[in-house]
Image: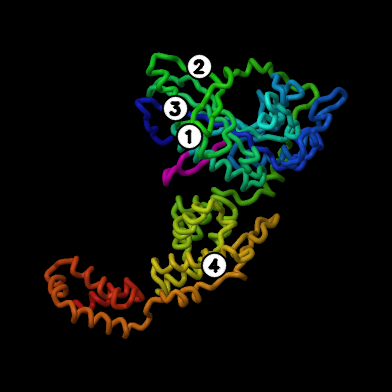
Amino acid sequence: MPKATLIRGFEVVIGIETHAQLSTRSKIFSGSSTHFGAAPNTQASAVDLALPGTLPVMNRGAVERAIRFGLAVGATVAPLSIFARKNYFYPDLPKGYQISQYETPVVQGGAVEFFCGDEPHKVNLTRAHLEEDAGKSLHEDYQGQTGIDLNRAGTPLLEIVTEPDMRSSLEAVEYAKALHALVVWLDICDGNMQEGSFRCDANVSVRKPGATFGTRREIKNLNSFKFMQQAIDFEVQWQIDLIEDGGKVQQATVLFNADTGETRAMRSKEDAHDYRYFPDPDLPPLVIAPEWVERVRSEMPELPRRMAQRFQGEYGLPVYDAAMMTQSKAFAAYFEAAAKACGQPKLVANWLMGEVSRRLNAEGGSISECPVSAGSLANLVSAIQAGAVSNAGARQVLDDLWRTNASAPKAGRVISASASDTITFSDSAEATVESVIDRLGIRQMSDTGELDRILDEVLAANPKSVEEYRAGKDKAFNALVGQAMKASKGKANPALVNERLKQKLG
């Protein structure tokens, strides 16, 4: 584990519980739809409400998604796991209990690997268990009252619990991003944080280095990476202030207010015994045969970490670059298509991590929405390699393509992602790299005779710089290069200018 950075002399300790809503069409124990956005209370069946005479029936698709996750993180998939009733009262919990897993979860152990900057990190998982979601309390539309929407009651969740391995808010956020990318890659969760499909609870405590773990407070329902970092940072400072003032942190559940940037206590934190867990009498143990696990394994897509290893071997990418190229299936497909088209994988990776990502981040978009296709990026990289355009000129070309194609229908977008994970990109509506280079008038000089003529004129017009260079002053050479680029109106290849000048200067 990387060395922790102390904050005001305290070490931060963070563990995260994530609720990933599984991508099944029906609920975990009933046939009710999980479609988001339906009118309130139109997707809650008698089974979801545990009305007398009803019995839950396990959703096989939810189990398969849990198996897929367990295999992806290198965990043990339990051959036998138990469903339990977690008893508590809440207005949007119509049963008075939640069906979950307690002593024997379906996924045990495992780890998630990711980068903080260019430094590798790994967070160990304690478990991942299947459970049903509760309903939703609605406050905004009811003056002095609370509305209850039970559409979400019974929606299948995979709760993923880490060890307390994280030591900063940045590390926690990067873990959450890596986990989010993984569950979307596996197609077990759509990852829509605005709709609540992926939400995190952060358990935060502080301690002096070498001391036992401090008392934790749990920040509930964080559905934004930005808010997660803000919430943890505020909570850390709050706990340190309290301790330094002579107080003691009390275990509690807290909420983050995005408007004020502060956390506030919601209730004292329950421990496991407060929920009076006991095996659900209506559900038999979940038995997963080895053959089932192997079938799921055979149907899984290439995992991001294995794809990253392949990119290192096939394309010679550094470890960090390979990890960045596999941040999503679409990103990996874009990279591989461009790398194969131009034969310059490292340069393609550089442009994707740099200029392309910078523009996408500024627009809040993903690679699937990139208005410049993989084919065009490959052509741009080829043009740079051929000396047709400089790096600075290539950025102008990319800007032009970006603006031109942004409004063109489907230009450079992901057209299809089939069951076999084949992703197709369209080039049909795009302006070509060559035409843009010519239209902008930035094509680099290919006539060496013309370049030599310009260099001879520059040397003749700047005898003092020539004399200073020959006397050992390197700045004089840079001045000559600048004059040559100016005389060529920026169209000379800088590398070739350097090479020919040195030859002429002896």
Q: Residue at x 19, y 80 (%)?
A: 461
Q: Which mark is residue 250?
A: 2
Q: Residues within 10 Å of mark 4 (few under 14, many from 20)?
A: some
* Residue type of the residue flagged with mark 4: Thr
Q: Secondary structure at mark 1?
A: helix
User: Which residue is identified by label 1?
Assistant: 230
Residue 316 visible, this angle: no
Is 450 a magenta residue? no
Place of residue 498 in the rendered image (x, y in percent of width and height, measured from the top left): 27, 72
Residue closest to the eye, 323 or 460: 460
Q: Which badge, 1 or 3, is on the more N-terminal residue?
A: 1
Which stretch is magenta? 110-121
Give the mark nearest the N terminus, 1 or 4: 1
Determine if residue 250 is in view: yes
Residue behind mark 3: 236
3D distance between C-alphas at marks 4 and 2: 57 Å
Residue 392, percent from left and from top: 39, 66
Q: The disc labelled 1 sits on which kind of residue? A: Gln
5 lies left or right of 82: left
Residue 54 falls in image quadrant: top right
Label 2, secondary structure: give it. Answer: loop
Task: Determine which residue is flagged by label 4.
Answer: 404
